[in-house]
């Protein structure tokens, strides 16, 4: 597509996974609520290499934001808890770091920008205060004056006009788009290795959206920052990302290079998502846009099945009884769907799942009988 | 800003005018007068007294006379205590109430805010439960219960402080301690609860998440990023609270024999001492109006989004 797209892809093929900047392995983040255990993120794995841009796509509640808040260890606890997995950043497992070490990573090596720029900046503190404190926190030998200079430089970089004056303003004196620019400037002021952008444009109007995305893209190339973009907008992914992870009900259902994903979407869910994006060049049947029927599942106490099966137009018997394994369907292209498992294995899995269910049912009957007897 | 301040100060004048007018007529509408006793006075005596205080004039004339006196800063003679006028009583008692009120409020603020902040930070731990239980006690146990208990324990049993008295009547600084603590209790409770809920709300806000994502230390997050916003509800609570506490408390003054203003609120009403009633009402109103004015100014200082023009 352009320069920054080909460069990291090349790096990706040359290096093996052990040089990954960020390696998320089997991450599980649950929320313990009165209604039951919400498995917001249930076994998510992905890697991010230097300079790469990764897109996390999914509907609301699919676990995109929770995944990234877990990387920053910002899950509100209680009720949230990271119950399993590893998040390896520069060789260290973030989940095992003490609070003090963790703070050295937050905002320094891994930065985050949020969905709503209107509420994400502290309304009581000047922009200068908020930027300077971040720089001085992570660079002990920098004086206040130097930090201020660096802040102004960053504001200029993100395109704030007359930054020398405006840095002394309060957040409410900026528009939404400008505030998001400030957030980006602040996030990148310590030369972060990874920038996590949690729906950075959702709260902005369309004309500003494109500018902000362009800015993130430019800066990630200029500053060699790897970016994770969380979005539900496939258009954003197509324009910015090298790789895409599609999430559904707390799990990654498909993972692929962007071009690959759009050319040959494998999971029926991905297919549906791509088909539901309006396109100029394709005439739609009856002039109606495709939509995926039904609602995303409630992630409280999900049964062991493919969570997408009630909405899937290709669902099979096995989909209703067992979660599909992850299979490779191309270089770097993985999908969790029974369609790509050969029939013999599928039948085997179905038999096993049914047997398990029978066991469970029998157990339930037994315990019930025992309860009755006890009465 | 200067313009705003001047406009607000000028606005105090019509407010006070309305308060004086309303209270002047309301006290006269109430049945009975200052010289109606158990035994009826001889007709001549009553007429003489009324003539002396101009109570025989038409009400509207009395009102004009009173308004004129107030404008000159004279709140009139007391109808009950014939040796002194209202100005004397207020001048003698208000400073005591202010001293006691200020000390109490400082105690309430220091301990209330600390307790509220700690309770919010350690939400749902024993610290939180203890602080909030203490606040519930402060709110629900009335002053006339707490005060004698404190006298019994700290004055009679432990003998740390005198049971009653006041530093102007030779009680020393120790005599201030018990009434100040007693008076501060309910304010402490209010401040602690307000601070806690406000802190909790602010700690959940997006910009605190941003601060955490920047890697800020917990103490920095609490003191630099959360406190300023969380203090806004406390500040607006403090306006009326200050007006209340500075004008004294009948119970505390009675129990600890503090020569404060509070007792006049009750006594003057029982005595139908018209001028004294209106006098204390004016004092209370002036303090309330000024406090609200200060609150608005402080608000603008705390919250940059508020500007006055």
Image (tube, grey):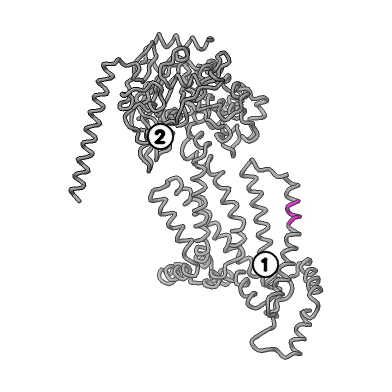
Q: Is residue A128 magenta?
A: no
Badge 2 sits on which subunit?
Answer: A
Q: Do discs 1 and 2 belong to a common subunit?
A: no
- Residue density around tag 1, few if under 14, some if 14–19, many if 20 or more, within 10 Å: some
* Residue identifier under label 2: A298
* Residue identifier under label 1: B281
Q: Is residue A208 visible?
A: yes
Residue B275 placement, left or right of B105: right
Residue shown at the point (54%, 46%) measured from the top left = B230
Element type at mark 2: loop
- The image quadrant that residue A342 belongs to is top left
Mark 1 or 2: in front is: 2
Give the camera-side residue of A243 and B306: A243
Up/down of A26 relative to B63, above or below: above
Residue shown at the point (42%, 12%) measured from the top left = A12
Q: Position of residue B65 (x, y in %)?
A: 80, 72
Badge 1 sits on which subunit?
Answer: B
Q: Position of residue B106 (x, y in %)?
A: 55, 56
Q: Position of residue A186 (x, y in %)?
A: 55, 27
The region drawn magenta spans B7-11
Give the camera-side residue of A230 and B186: A230
Give the camera-side residue of A68 and B72: A68
């Amino acid at each position: 597509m352009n320069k920054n797209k080909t460069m990291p892809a090349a790096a990706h093929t040359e290096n093996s996974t052990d040089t990954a900047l960020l390696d998320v392995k089997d991450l599980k983040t649950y929320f313990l609520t009165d209604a039951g255990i919400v498995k917001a993120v249930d076994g998510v794995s992905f890697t991010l290499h230097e300079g790469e841009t990764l897109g996390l796509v999914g509907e609301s509640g699919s676990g995109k934001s929770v995944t990234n808040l877990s990387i920053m260890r910002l899950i509100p606890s209680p009720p949230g808890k990271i119950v399993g997995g590893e998040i390896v950043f520069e060789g260290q497992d973030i989940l095992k770091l003490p609070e003090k070490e963790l703070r050295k990573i937050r905002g320094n090596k891994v930065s985050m920008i949020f969905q709503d720029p209107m509420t994400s900046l502290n309304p009581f503190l000047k922009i200068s205060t908020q930027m300077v404190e971040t720089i001085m926190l992570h660079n002990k030998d920098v004086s206040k004056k130097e930090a201020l200079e660096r802040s102004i430089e960053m504001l200029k970089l993100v395109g704030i006009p007359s930054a020398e004056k405006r840095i002394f303003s309060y957040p409410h004196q900026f528009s939404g788009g400008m505030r998001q620019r400030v957030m980006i400037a602040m996030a990148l002021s310590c030369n972060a290795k990874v920038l996590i952008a949690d729906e950075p444009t959702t709260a902005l109007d369309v004309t500003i959206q494109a500018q902000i995305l362009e800015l993130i893209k430019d800066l990630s190339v200029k500053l060699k920052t790897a970016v994770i973009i969380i979005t539900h907008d496939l258009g954003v992914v197509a324009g910015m990302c090298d790789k895409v992870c599609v999430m559904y009900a707390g799990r990654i259902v498909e993972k692929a290079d962007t071009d690959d994903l759009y050319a040959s979407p494998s999971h029926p869910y991905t297919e549906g998502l791509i088909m539901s994006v309006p396109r100029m060049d394709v005439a739609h049947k009856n002039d109606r846009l495709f939509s995926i029927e039904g609602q995303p599942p409630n992630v409280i106490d999900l049964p062991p099945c493919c969570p997408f099966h009630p909405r899937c137009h290709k669902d099979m018997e096995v989909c209703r009884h067992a979660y599909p394994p992850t299979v490779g369907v191309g270089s770097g292209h993985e999908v969790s769907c029974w369609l790509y498992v050969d029939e013999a294995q599928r039948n085997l899995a179905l038999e096993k799942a049914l047997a398990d269910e029978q066991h469970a049912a029998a157990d339930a009957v037994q315990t019930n009988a025992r309860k009755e007897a006890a009465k | 800003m200067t313009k705003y301040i001047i406009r607000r100060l000028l606005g105090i004048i019509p407010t006070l005018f309305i308060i004086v007018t309303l209270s002047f007529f309301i006290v006269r509408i109430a049945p009975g007068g200052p010289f109606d006793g158990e035994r009826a006075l001889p007709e001549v005596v009553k007429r003489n007294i009324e003539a002396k205080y101009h109570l025989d004039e038409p009400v509207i004339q009395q009102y004009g006379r009173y308004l004129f006196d107030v404008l000159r800063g004279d709140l009139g003679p007391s109808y009950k205590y014939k040796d002194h006028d209202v100005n004397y009583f207020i001048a003698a008692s208000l400073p005591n109430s202010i001293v006691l009120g200020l000390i109490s409020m400082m105690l309430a603020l220091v301990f209330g805010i600390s307790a509220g902040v700690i309770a919010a930070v350690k939400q749902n731990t024993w610290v939180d439960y203890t602080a909030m239980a203490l606040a519930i006690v402060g709110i629900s146990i009335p002053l006339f219960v707490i005060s004698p208990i404190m006298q019994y324990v700290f004055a009679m049993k432990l003998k740390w402080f005198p049971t009653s008295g006041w530093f102007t009547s030779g009680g020393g600084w120790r005599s201030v301690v018990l009434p100040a603590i007693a008076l501060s209790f309910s304010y402490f409770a209010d401040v602690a609860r307000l601070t806690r809920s406000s802190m909790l709300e602010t700690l959940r806000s997006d910009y605190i998440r941003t601060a955490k994502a920047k890697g800020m230390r917990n103490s920095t997050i609490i003191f630099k990023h959360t406190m300023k916003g969380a203090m806004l509800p406390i500040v607006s609570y403090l306006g009326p609270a200050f007006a209340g506490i500075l004008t004294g408390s009948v119970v505390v003054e009675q129990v600890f024999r503090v020569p404060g203003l509070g007792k006049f609120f009750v006594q003057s009403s029982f005595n139908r001492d018209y001028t004294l009633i209106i006098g204390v009402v004016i004092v209370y109103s002036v303090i309330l109006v000024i406090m609200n004015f200060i609150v608005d100014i402080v608000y603008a200082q705390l919250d940059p989004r508020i500007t006055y023009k």
